[in-house]
Amino acid sequence: MTKNLLIALIIAFLAPIAAYAAAPVLKFRPDSTFHILQVTDLHYIHGDSRCDSVITHLQEAIRAEAPDLVVLTGDLIYGNARESIRSVISAVSSAGVPFAVTFGNHDDESGLSRRELFDIISSYPGNLTDSVAGIPGVTNFVLPVLSSDGTRDAAALYCFDSNSYCRLPGVKGYDYIKSEQIDWYRSESQRFADANSGEPLPSVAFFHIPLPEFAQAAADQSIPLAGTRGEKCCSPALNSGLFAAFKERGDVFAVFVDHDNDYATVLHGIILAYGRYSGGDTEYNHLGPRGYRTIILRESRPSLSTAIRLSSSAILHPLTR
């Protein structure tokens, strides 16, 4: 074995360990706010001219918002999987901001499995993406956010792998979040509540495929929508009960997803919000200027402010609740 090969093997072995050891701690700011940048539907293809400005825009968005966390909610890549995922994650990691990823239905269609993509993502500094063993999907995890004084968990950010397409006979369309995932959420929710004097810990959730309740809210003309409705709600045909679990547990008060919309609404007291298409000309360019969603959580009570910010810096569809 040559010296250079030995060094390369050592670096490859130590890189994930170093990234894990340096995993950042999330914490509310001294002003009791926590800032999240939601980036979605990049549909990035390395080497494709239609994506030339995607990485630049992503880096500019992070610099402009200076968030405490970047959450990438799926459909990050659309081809040339290994180089594409490295380009996207490297752009976020190099900004020095903690980040987390939830997969979309297209991410594993370009030559790498979800697990292989997860392994690449996990090798980068600043990564907080995790994977709970024994339940469906790969990107299922929860991120606690410490109080501004650092003495306790003040919020929790749940990330779910919403899978891709339903495989049940006779059921077409998108997949649903499985009962094992919901059971995991209930268990984590109870754990946080037990540590919070029995009170539900204010929480928000991120995943890719919208719940059927998004369609329910959009169909009710008495419920206002703050934003653009570019297509019907692409939710699963089957409702597995995650929204009901959120209501029963009483902790998750906002849900952020993807696809060809950018509106936010409120159903039964829970904010239901889409991100904003953040990619190039490979998909969704009919929406107009790309952008992203900003989210500011408040420590004092379960509340937040959110809006769409375009690449031009224009702010659209603000919502505070």
Image (cartoon, rainbow, N blue to C red):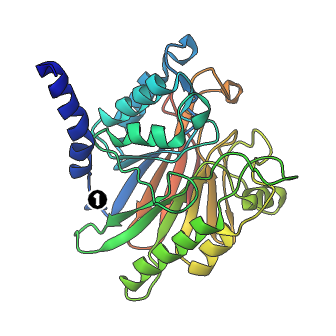
Q: Residue furthest right?
A: 170
Left or right: 219 in relation to 183: right
Residue 307 location, x and y as percent?
Answer: 54, 47
Q: Is residue 14 above or below residue 198?
A: above
The residue tagged 1 is 29
Q: Is residue 252 above or below residue 226?
A: below
Tell me the residue at 53%/18% (across/down).
51
* Image quadrant where one finds the C terminus: bottom right
For this rendering, which residue is in front, 245 or 85? 85
Residue 254 location, x and y as percent?
Answer: 56, 63
Q: Quadrant of residue 288?
A: top right
Left or right: 197 in relation to 321: left
Crowding at mark 1 (Cα within 10 Å: few <14, some 14-19, many 20+): some
For this rendering, which residue is in front, 218 or 96? 96
Q: Residue furthest top?
A: 49
Q: Quadrant of residue 238?
A: bottom right
Q: Amino acid at mark 1?
A: Arg
Q: Is residue 80 above or below residue 234?
A: above
Residue 144 location, x and y as percent?
Answer: 37, 65
Q: Residue furthest left?
A: 3
Residue 150 location, x and y as percent?
Answer: 23, 69
For this rendering, which residue is in front, 162 or 281? 162
Tell me the residue at 83%/48% (across/down).
172
Tell me the residue at 57%/73% (across/down).
183
Q: How many marks?
A: 1
Q: Secondary structure at mark 1?
A: loop
* Image quadrant where one finds the N terminus: top left
Tell me the residue at 67%/41% (across/down).
259
Q: Residue furthest bottom?
A: 197
